[in-house]
Image (spheres, coloured by chain):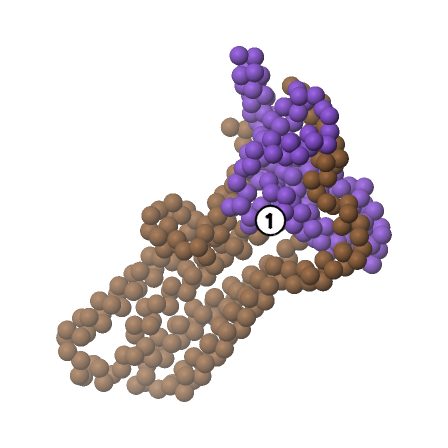
Chain colours: A purple, B brown
Amino acid sequence: MLKENSKEEFLQLIQENKGIIFRICNSYCRNKNDREDLAQEIIYQLWKSGQSFDNEHRFSTWMYRVALNVAISFYRKEKSSNAFMPLTDNLAELSDKNETNDEMEEKINLLQQFINELKELDKALMILHLDARSYSEIAEVLGITETNVATKLSRIKDKLKEKFNQKLLTTNN
Amino acid sequence: MNDLELQAIWQSYDKKLEEARLLNLQSWALNLQCFEALQKQKATSKLKSLINLKAFIAFLGIVWVAFLSFLVYHSLELSKIFFVVSVSAIIIVNIIAIVVYITHIVWLKQINNSDNIVSTQQKLARLQTSTMWITRILFLQTPFHTTWFISFKMFAHASVGAWMFQICITLFFTWIAIWLYRNISYKNMDKKWFRILFSSSEWTSVVKAIDFIKEIEDFKKDSVS
């Protein structure tokens, strides 16, 4: 449990785990304003749910549960305005500030595009997997069995490989 | 492509996200004053306003039931038997709807974002579809709205044609009420009549929630097929 009125402790934990918020906001919102709104909503809900945090569990696992629940609810409400925006828009924004090789950029673009096309729950599963969370942790966050996690991930990754291979073929031709 | 390659791509993306500051998270999340303001601004969350709305509707329902009960209590005589029976049936249906509303308020209070995703999202989607179940229950009172005004005087004075008309109307509304009660279900959401009945914008979110419940059920399945 987070101590009452312990804003400093709370903000420090948020700061240490801010990557989770970045990843989730960017995967569930295509629009900058929506991302800001969702980030605020997630932090507010984390603060409000602080009493339910059990110190025996990892903070990041609890944070994933709250943040993904908020993001999925937010996404479902805002779905109509969440029409797919080409990721190149985002990458252009990123490229101005970072020098990376084209190949990696292409792969990142493809991966993000693939994640954006996934259904809400599959998206949550993939985000957790890409963050190198164990099957048991993913199962705990999502509320499904480890076998189910393994089956679903295998299917999603097969589709992803297919997408990457198709892209490679197109590039080679 | 293996898991490590995939995670390497994700980490590169992660790093770029953070460096590019697509979210202005650091600047405002670390600002305590801003955080305080946010708390006040969000003091009445959407969930809380939904609880208040449901509580208000339940309160109106209780007032309506109390009023009808008052009328029934002061009409307890054989000559007003149709009125007493019909209004009592309407009261029972309304009491059921009020109980459902109160149950939803309890469910809303139980929703906890720190529970697992499937359970929380399922509860939220079920609540959104609750409007449909209440509508289904309330349809059951329709035939009684066609009988409460019948009196013994009507037996003596009304023509055969008038009685035939009355019987047809009551039977029709009885049939439609039972049929709607049995058929308003997410299993029929793809049927044309269902789409027409629930086509207004306020029902769109309900229909979407039904779709999402189906999606959650599929997601929970362990099947390897």
**Residue A155, x across and y down, in percent:** 57, 27
Image point (46%, 61%), residue name:
B134
Image point (56%, 23%), residue name:
A163
The residue beneath circle 1 is A74
**Residue B2, x across and y down, in percent:** 67, 20
Chain of residue at mark 1: A
Q: Amino acid at mark 1?
A: Phe
Q: Nearer the viewer, residue A166 or B99?
A: A166
Can residue B75 be seen? yes
Q: Residue furthest left?
A: B160
Rendered view: B84 above or below B164 = below
Quadrant, the N terminus of chain B: top right
**Residue A17, x across and y down, in percent:** 77, 41
Task: Left or right? Give the position of B71 relative to B36.
Answer: left
| Residue B175 sits in quarter | bottom left
Classify mark 1: helix, strand or loop. Answer: helix
